[in-house]
Amino acid sequence: MKEANSLEVVILAAGQGTRMRSQLPKVLHRLGGKPLLGHVIDAARALGPAAIRIVFGHGGEQVCAALPSADLHWVRQEAQLGTGHAVQMAQPHCADAGQVLVLYGDVPLLQADTLRAFMQSVPEHGMGLMTVRLADPTGYGRVIRDAAGAVMRIVEEKDASPEEKSVGEVNTGIMLLPGKRLGSWLERLGNDNAQGEYYLTDVVSLAREDGVEVQAFAVADPAEVAGVNNKVQLAELERAFQARQARALMLAGVLVTDPARLDIRGEIEIAPDTLLEPNVMLEGRVRIGANCVIGMGCVLRDVELGDGVEVLPYSVMEGARIADRVRIGPFARIRPGTTLAEGVHIGNYVEVKASAIGRGSKVNHLSYIGDAEIGNGVNVGAGAITCNYDGANKHKTIIEDDVFIGSDTQLVAPVRVAQGATIGAGSTITHDAPAGELTLSRPPQRTRTGWKRPTKKSG
């Protein structure tokens, strides 16, 4: 049996979301690179509840499959008969909870700190109601108070009188309910309203009837409790989310040139005095050291950068580890499995994949390095490539320290270029090159004296 003072969270995520005009369930649309429902789950987890129960319906199997986790308990709502009915589906599973917190799967910006403050404001054995004041409350249930300011009831807009519609304080739907009272309140809900649904908001009146104090908690930022009903609202909340992320970075000492043109879609850590130029996108798990510069239009996904790294404009990096004082780009592509040691230079239109490049080495122009191990102090000339794929299997190229690779060289793997070797420009290397020697494979140059270009015949 659960402890009497335990908290359980119920997240309502069964809505069809027809106004999204999408076959994807509404709660799986992404904000900041994560499903809407994922944001709500993260906020719930931060509270340390005894259980998180998600009421699902439309596209249920798809929703469950998208967010697999042992700490989530899924409750099916076959017919969508209102929010009260949705909580009824979950209530038998949390009958022993001391408190039940009701959240919504399409309200992604609600923060755990706000929820903690909300819960602390509710007296023991009382009921909590989260509200917000809106300049335009159209579409929301109004919070009706008595002359003393106590909450009396919530009236949905379709059931509200003109006087009630003039009220600016609205219900967010987020409630903290005493577990021992909840079952009886849900049993007493009716559906005599314009929608013919069982409204969870009606428990406010029932709480008053039973002498239970209803504590309203007003949220300062309307975006924090805004729901997503269509793709316009999704885009608006995306920008609100990104503004929040950018603000947090700037307060931590990161230089953000234009906060309105920064996209963060993952778990990000950036040290002070790093500069993010416009239109940078950071995805997945990104760690960036101090005094770095991330140029305009760069995309970084699941990467770790040391201190003093410069990534020039329009470079794309994924699944890589970059040491201190590395310079990359512009227009470079760093693919998964790449590690770049201190002081490496990767230049314009260079692609590196699943390779380790040693300290101080340079690959500056128009080259492809794949499945390679490159030592320290190596210079790779323009247009050089490692031919790592034979049509069936990948093979490794090994280039030892202090090697010079001439421009337009093809290294046909598997092949090793030993320490201090020089490869002449324009060579195709198919066998190992010895240490300290010049290796090249050019044919002799010839000139045909008196040769004329062909011309078109007249007439």
Image (tube, rainbow, N blue to C red):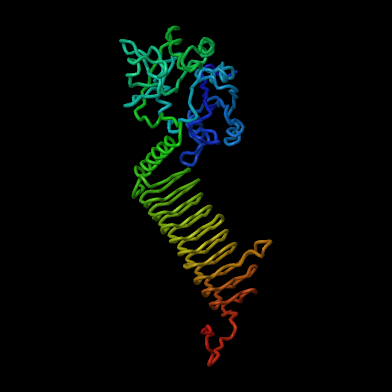
Q: Residue furthest bottom?
A: 450
Looking at the image, the residue that sits furthest to the front is: 459
* Number of marks: 0
- Quadrant in the picture for residue 151: top left
Q: Is residue 311 visible?
A: yes
Report the front residue among 193 and 342: 193
Residue 267 position, x and y percent, is 47, 43
Front residue of this view, candidates 393 and 134: 134
Q: Look at the image and tell me whether residue 362 can be seen.
A: no
Q: Quadrant where the N terminus lies?
A: top right
- Give the percent coordinates (x, y) of residue 437: 57, 80
Viewer-nearest residue: 431 or 300: 300
Residue sitting at x 34%, y 50%: 257
Q: Vertical placement of 327 versus 441: above or below?
A: above
- Compared to residue 459, the image places residue 55 above or below, namely above
User: Which residue is depicted at the point 48% across and 47% down?
Assistant: 283
Expressed as whole percent of the image width and height from the top left, the position of residue 402 reads 52, 72
Horizontally, is 180 left or right of 224 in the view? Answer: right
Residue 202 location, x and y as percent?
A: 46, 14
Q: Which residue: 64% across, 73% down? A: 430
Q: Nearer the viewer, residue 280 or 126?
A: 280
